[in-house]
Image (cartoon, rainbow, N blue to C red):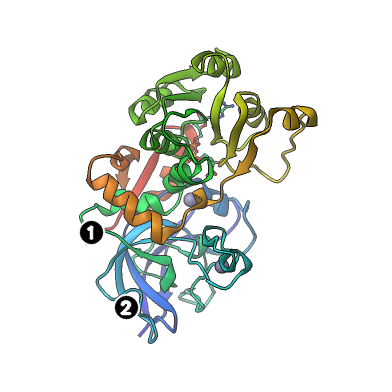
Amino acid sequence: MSVQVHGVVARAKGQPVTLETIVVPDPGPGEARVRPLACGVCHTDLHYRDGAINDDFPFLLGHEAAGVVESVGPDVTEVAPGDYVILNWRAVCGTCRACMRGRPWYCFSSHNATQRMTLLDGTELSPALGIGAFAEMTLVAAGQCTKVDPAAPAEVAGLLGCGVMAGLGAALNTGNVTRGDTVAVIGCGGVGDAAIAGARLAGARVIVAVDIDDRKLELARGFGATHTVNSRQTDPVEAIREATDGFGADVVIEAIGRPETYEQAFYARDLAGTVVLVGVPSPDMRLELPLIEYFGRGGSLKSSWYGDCLPSRDFPMLIDLYLQGRLPLQDFVSETIGIGDVEEAFDKMHRGDVLRSVVVFDR
Ligand code: APR
Ligand code: ZN
Ligand code: ZN
């Protein structure tokens, strides 16, 4: 039987989101129906609402969630009703060219539910990143459910589903930060702070945090920054060199997605260093760099998709580290809010007041 629940829907470009009754079908083959317990508010939700991703309105928003599997389709074996899961948007297919080459974290053909959730009048919804978890129930591909230790509270665990994983993975997976490295992170929102936490976890010896907002720099210290730079007042490239014996950092992570900050990252790395772009640029942005500098400095310039994570490998491991007190995921939760407060949370995010607002569902 399909169920009717409340969900946060973006009906039209730029319009405030509304709470709607949605219809969630019974899970079919390969699908799972999940009851979200908590779901973080991410920039990507706002980008969907603003029509910056595509025009497939109406969208069912929300995609950084943890919850409980309610029911599964006939052939599903990897999860069962009652399982505590984080939802992911990389349900690896196992057969695309990336998967076949043993690089499933790049999977080019990630699974989503086949059936569509709808509004009461039958209008099909497009779930954000194939998830749609600002809802009391949602339908996903079974592979989008990653089981983790239920001892981790949902408002904390859900954050690994997107932004925090992106930042942690930018440092741990894409940047391959290792013991003794020097690291700089430009942009210290939720993603940048997660990159800082990842660098600390990996054993970085110097971690320079760069932002234009002193409140963010203060938070960055809490996640492990050893140096902070307000780039409105101080040249960040110079400051990063100063903090790294004059050389530049082994790994520089750009967590904003802008050409001017990318350029800072490019010049702030040491010879043979790595730049990781995890901030998402907009399509109109252009970058111009002297090619000789790119060649002459060696190393690598990389981008990090979803932190190059493999959910089945990374989520349970990171939750275990959190439970051992080695990864302060709880510090990313600036506030918990209700399902009706998402529009207000977008404003706070826009003003830079929060790392993450997290919707918690009444049970
Ligand atoms: N120089 C330095 N810091 C800047 C600059 C700048 N020119 N412009 C903005 N910032 C800082 C902001 O002060 C803020 O602390 O960058 C941070 C961005 O953080 P958030 O807006 O909270 O964004 P976040 O959720 O961390 O995501 C960062 O990653 O996944 C992508 O779409 C996401 O592109 C976005 C990026
Ligand atoms: Zn694949
Ligand atoms: Zn997101």
Residue 43 in view here: yes
Q: Residues within 10 Å of mark 1 (few under 14, many from 20)?
A: some
Residue 71 disc label: 2
Q: Position of residue 172 (x, y in %)?
A: 45, 43
Give the quadrant of the N terminus.
bottom left
Residues at marks 1 and 2 touching, judged by CB atoms closer than 8 Å: no
Q: Is residue 298 left or right of residue 141?
A: right
* 338 and 274: which is toward the camera: 274
Q: Is mark 2 within 8 Å of ligand 3?
A: no
Q: Is 49 located above or below residue 227 in the figure?
A: below
Measuring 50% from the left and 37% from the top, which residue is drawn there? 350
**Mark 1: which amino acid?**
Pro
| Dot 2 crowding, Cα within 10 Å, few <14, some 14–19, many 20+ | many
The circle drawn on residue 11 is none
Q: Position of residue 313 (x, y in %)?
A: 39, 58
- Give the spatial CA distance, label 1 vs label 2: 18 Å
Residue at 33% x, 27% y is 222
Q: Nearer the viewer, residue 150 or 301?
A: 301
Q: Amino acid at mark 2?
A: Ser
Instruction: Tell me what residue is drawn at x 54 percent, y 74 percent.
Output: 123
**Residue 307's x, y, as percent?**
50, 48
Residue depicted at 54% across the width and 36% down the height: 255
The front one of 173 and 121 is 173
The residue that label 1 is drawn on is 150
- Would residue 70 be found to the left or right of residue 268 on screen? left
- Inspect this view and state whether residue 231 appears: no
Closer to the N terminus: mark 1 or mark 2?
Answer: 2
- Residue 293: x and y in percent read 74, 27
Residue 23, placed above or below residue 158: below
Q: Quadrant of the C terminus?
A: bottom left
- Looking at the picture, tell me which residue is in the foreground, 363 or 198: 198
Q: Secondary structure at mark 2?
A: strand
